[in-house]
Structures are given as structure tokens and as C-alpha cells.
Amino acid sequence: MRRFRLRPRTWIALGVVGVVAAALSVAGYAYFTSSGSGSGTATVGSSGGWSVAVTSPSGGPLFPGSGSEQFNYTVTNTGSGPAALGSVVYQVNPNWSQGACNASDFSIDGAAAGSPFTENWSNTVVPGGGSVSWNFTVTMVDNGQNQNDCQGQSVPVQVIAS
């Protein structure tokens, strides 16, 4: 029977393979335990507010008890995140007057003369940079008095979003 002999190079190669295998098997099972902690912060966005654009009216002219002018408006969320639009209030500027002509000579969308009208948007969610649009109508009421001071006036309306 013949004996199987390995050359010295082969023995060296087998030895290196054995050492590497042993090292990998130990490395695969060896580990350290430790604990640690850390902290960080999250940035919460803030409301950017609302921007309101009102178009020039269409219709008119206004006379006591007749005629109407329609205004269109757009409310834009100026923030980067979504915001809830609760309501939009339309009114003739309550601080405006020209002689005896003032906000009480006008009605908005059928509200009592001189009173603001509130459009309920029921917390409609408007995305950041998004907008909603609607319209309202202004009429001049016939109050049974001399309304000559209203002739030729530009009546200032306000649209307030919240």
C-alpha cells in the first residue's frame, strides 16, 4: 500500500486555511455589549397664514334698492404645510364713511345692512401653497333716507380669512 504524501507547500496552504477558518469562527461569535443614548430634535412647522386676493367687481352700478356687484376672491395658504380654513368674513369697511354714506347703506350676500357676512368653510384643509376661491355680492339698501352722499363713491370691502 502506498502512502499518500503531501508536499510542504500544500501543508503550508492547509495551515493558512485552518488559521483563517479558526479566526473567522472566533470572530463570528465574539462581540461586546454596551449601552448608550442619544438625543435629537424634530422641527415642527408653523402656520404661514392666509393671503386674500379680491378681484374688481362685476355688475353694478349700485342704486338704493337695486343693482348688485359681484366680487370674486381667492384665499391662499402661504405656509408650506396644510392649514384648515375655518371661515371667510366679507364686510364693507365699518370705519369707512363719506358724509352720511357708510357701511350701513350696503348689504353683503343678503346680510343685514352694515353687518358682516360669514362664509363657513368648515375647516377645509388647504395644502401649503394651495388656494380656494369663491364670490360674494354687494347691494345698496334703500333705507328710506336721502342717500345722495353715496353717489359716485368707491365702497371699500374687506375679506378676512381665518
Image (cartoon, helix red, strand yellow):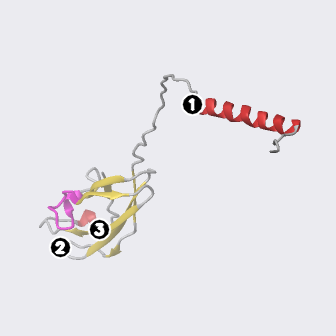
Q: Nearer the viewer, mark 1 or mark 2?
A: 1
Q: Secondary structure at mark 3?
A: loop
Left or right, 130 with respect to 113, comes to: right
Left or right, 6 with respect to 130, comes to: right
161 versus 67 height, above or below = above
Q: Considering depth in this image, is 10 or 102 the residue closer to the camera?
A: 10
Check disc 3: other Cα within 10 Å, few if <14, some if 14-19, many if 20+.
Answer: few
Please give the name of the residue rendered at 45% of the width and 36% of the height, measured from the top-left corner: 42
Left or right, 82 with respect to 144, comes to: right
- Most extreme residue toward the left is 144
- Name the quarter where the N terminus is drawn: top right
Task: Tell me the number on the disc at residue 29.
Answer: 1
Within the magenta stretch, is there residue 116?
yes
Check disc 1: other Cα within 10 Å, few if <14, some if 14-19, many if 20+.
Answer: few
| Residue underneath mark 3 | 151
Q: Can see residue 45?
A: yes
Check disc 2: other Cα within 10 Å, few if <14, some if 14-19, many if 20+.
Answer: some
- Most extreme residue toward the front is 1
Q: Considering depth in this image, is 114 or 29 the residue closer to the camera?
A: 29
Q: What amino acid does circle 3 point to?
A: Gln
Q: Nearer the viewer, mark 2 or mark 3?
A: 2
Q: Which of the 4 quarters of the picture holds residue 127?
A: bottom left
Q: Magenta residues? A: 102-119
Q: Secondary structure at mark 1?
A: helix
Q: Considering depth in this image, is 53 or 70 the residue closer to the camera?
A: 53
Q: What amino acid does circle 1 point to?
A: Tyr
| Residue underneath mark 2 | 65
